[in-house]
Image: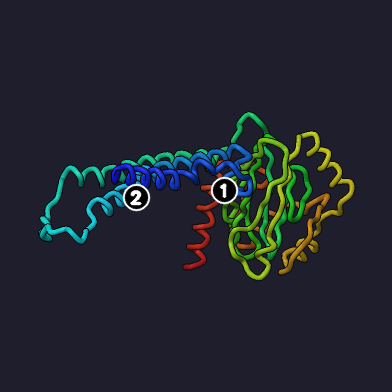
Amino acid sequence: MKKQKLLHIGKVMMMAALAPVLLAGCDSRYLILNPQGPVAQKEYNLIIFSIVLCAIVVIPVLGLLVYIVFRYRDKPENKAPYAPEWDDSKTLEIVWWGIPIVIIGILGFFTAKTTYNLVEPPKKDIEPLTIEVTSLDWKWLFQYPDQNIATVNYVEIPEDVPVQFVLTSDAPMNSFWVPELGGQLYSMPGMAMGLWLQADHSGEFFGSGANFTGDGFAHMTFKVTSKPQSEFDQWVKQVKQTAPALTKADYDKLAEQGLSKEKSYSAIPEGLFKEIVDKNGGQYYKQHHHMNSEDIAEMRMNVGHQAHEHHE
């Protein structure tokens, strides 16, 4: 009877531990667990893989805790003398240290492998789209260098096409995050950070700043709309025909502290993104060029050298 009770308790605890994993994909309200692109899918798989590996340790430990508490608890009728024998077991030591070490090694390998894979475009046989992103107080400016247009607080992208967001900041450091398309990446003054994202299908996705930057931080949200290539091209054409051009004066106004509604611009000043990076202590050599891992490493090295020289 007691064994059946313990078995029942163990089953309940195991189901409680596994419930978050089994039900993770059942509700799209949890955006990070609702991947809508290859980058987000890889990160989602890594999350689930990590949970399963952790469960291999956590569930047995919780089960043993319950078993030991019930099996070896003291009882009023217990007349056995308290005479513990302090000793060790080399076998048990190897087991309870060896298993976590193996798990950490496996998790570290797959985490590093996935992280380095995300530096490259999700699809290498399709011409990618570059979008230069500048975080401001408290708004987002998106420049399309190849299309020569810009938007504020919203992004349009073609579906099933790799998009490289090149991030910088002309305000306090922020973090660019579209949970359903991939993980977040910091936008920092003087830096040009590359982030690959891709949407598998048409839809609208929530984006936001994920790093506190002051009073208007809560309003630093934007939407990412994915649509077929033909509709994206039509949207670009419409912006060019109907929106005003972005001037240096317009940008200076945007850069001031304050909130902003969604805006579109039919043209952007040549080299604006480069100027933003350079004026904050960086050097952006890859203007209008898709950044790969070597480009990003070069950018970080140059900024590091400049910071060291400035300190001296």
Q: Position of residue 14 (x, y in %)?
A: 40, 44
Q: Which residue is mark 1?
A: 183
Q: Quadrant of residue 98?
A: top left
Q: Quadrant of the N terminus?
A: top left
Marking on residue 231: none
Q: Which residue is mark 2?
A: 62
Q: Quadrant of residue 292?
A: top right
Disc with the residue nearer the chain's start (2 vs 1)? 2
Q: Is residue 275 left or right of residue 268?
A: left
Q: Nearer the viewer, residue 17 or 158?
A: 17
Please give the name of the residue rendered at 68% of the width and 67% of the height, measured from the top-left corner.
216
* Other residues around mark 2 within 10 Å, as few (<14) / some (14–19) / many (≥20): some
Q: Position of residue 23 (x, y in %)?
A: 54, 43
Q: Is residue 281 left or right of residue 127?
A: left
The amino acid beneath tag 2 is Leu
Q: Position of residue 97 (x, y in %)?
A: 26, 47
Q: Position of residue 268 (x, y in %)?
A: 78, 52
Q: How is the image coloured?
A: rainbow
Q: Nearer the viewer, residue 156 or 8?
A: 8
Q: Secondary structure at mark 2?
A: helix
Of labels 2 and 1, the one closer to you: 2
Please give the name of the residue rendered at 20% of the width and 47% of the height, measured from the top-left corner.
93
Residue 115 visible at all = no
Instruction: List the single residue furthest toward the top.
Output: 125
Q: Is residue 200 left or right of residue 99?
A: right
